[in-house]
Image: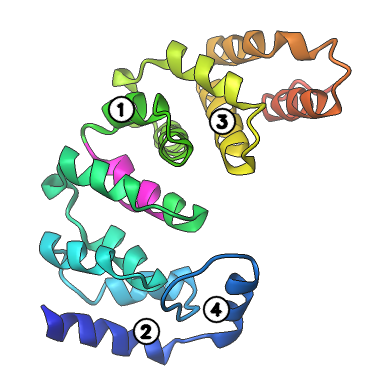
Amino acid sequence: METIIRSIRSDLRLSMNGVTAASMREKGVHYRMNFGVDLMRIRETADRYTPDALLAEELWKEDVRELKIIATLLYPADRFTREAADRWVDAINNQEIREQVCRNLFQQLLFAGVLVNDWGGSEEERVRTTGYWLYARLCITHATSLEEVESDLLLSRAAGDLKSGSMLLRQASLNVLKYHGRLSEGNRDEVLDRVAGFYDSADPFEREILDQLRFEFGLTD
């Protein structure tokens, strides 16, 4: 195991980009180590190794950007448990990792819809944000696990979070409404009903949200 991890680190060093790593630090994204490798090369590196649950767990524990992302690519979805999902979601501390783990791993889980229900109702903003992003991914892929999502309750929570003080949570909640509305005309109308109060709002932020949703649904004047 340690030999494989050392090999992965060596591969990453060959693609290291100090400028990108420095730029991420300046934007407040901090790791113990960040090679600044672009996502395409990270995927190419992961492709050289055999998916393995134990290896992925070890990589996820490392406070190294690229190793965490590779962990999301190497964990076999059929070996990933609910306990592991709750443990991993608690370790997500920035938006890039949230997006990568939702795309590379969480959306493939047979119980992804259950995770959306539970995480989307969490009192922890970081966990709720991940639940929202996961739902957006399920909408994009038209995953069968969408059938398990309690969409009415999720939309209600997301609409309420549009006024959150957290920019990440606001964006995630807006994505829930956007991607849910894309699925059908009925869903679109359901979303617009959730923000019906924004039509006569004097709040420029609420008007902007409404304009974004109408544009998303092809309803611009």
Q: Nearer the viewer, residue 184 or 145?
A: 145
**Amino acid at dot 1:** Gly
How many residues crowd around disc 1 within 10 Å: few (fewer than 14), some, or many (20 or more)? Answer: many
Magenta residues (range): 100-109
How many residues crowd around disc 2 within 10 Å: few (fewer than 14), some, or many (20 or more)? Answer: many
Color encoding of the figure: rainbow
**Residue at label 4?**
21
**Residue at label 3?**
173
Q: Residue 145, position in %: x, y?
A: 29, 27
> The residue tagged with tag 1: helix, strand or loop?
helix
Q: Calculate the distance from the C-alpha at mark 3 to the C-alpha at mark 1.
A: 16 Å
Q: Residue 183, position in %: x, y?
A: 50, 22
Q: Calculate the distance from the C-alpha at mark 3 to the C-alpha at mark 4.
A: 29 Å
Which numbered dot is residue 113? 1
The answer to the question of whether label 2 and label 4 lie on touching residues, with beta carbons closer than 8 A, is no
Quadrant assignment for the C terminus: top right
The answer to the question of whether label 4 and label 1 lie on touching residues, with beta carbons closer than 8 A, is no
Along the polypeptide, which appears first: circle 3 or circle 4?
4
Along the polypeptide, which appears first: circle 2 or circle 4?
2
Along the polypeptide, which appears first: circle 2 or circle 1?
2
Q: Calculate the distance from the C-alpha at mark 4 to the C-alpha at mark 1.
A: 34 Å
Along the polypeptide, which appears first: circle 4 or circle 1?
4
**Amino acid at dot 4:** Ala
Q: Is residue 30 left or right of residue 104?
A: right
**Amino acid at dot 2:** Leu
> The residue tagged with tag 4: helix, strand or loop?
helix
Q: Quadrant of residue 81?
A: top left
Seen at 62% across and 39% down, the residue is 166
> The residue tagged with tag 3: helix, strand or loop?
helix
**Residue at label 2?**
12
How many residues crowd around disc 3 within 10 Å: few (fewer than 14), some, or many (20 or more)? Answer: many
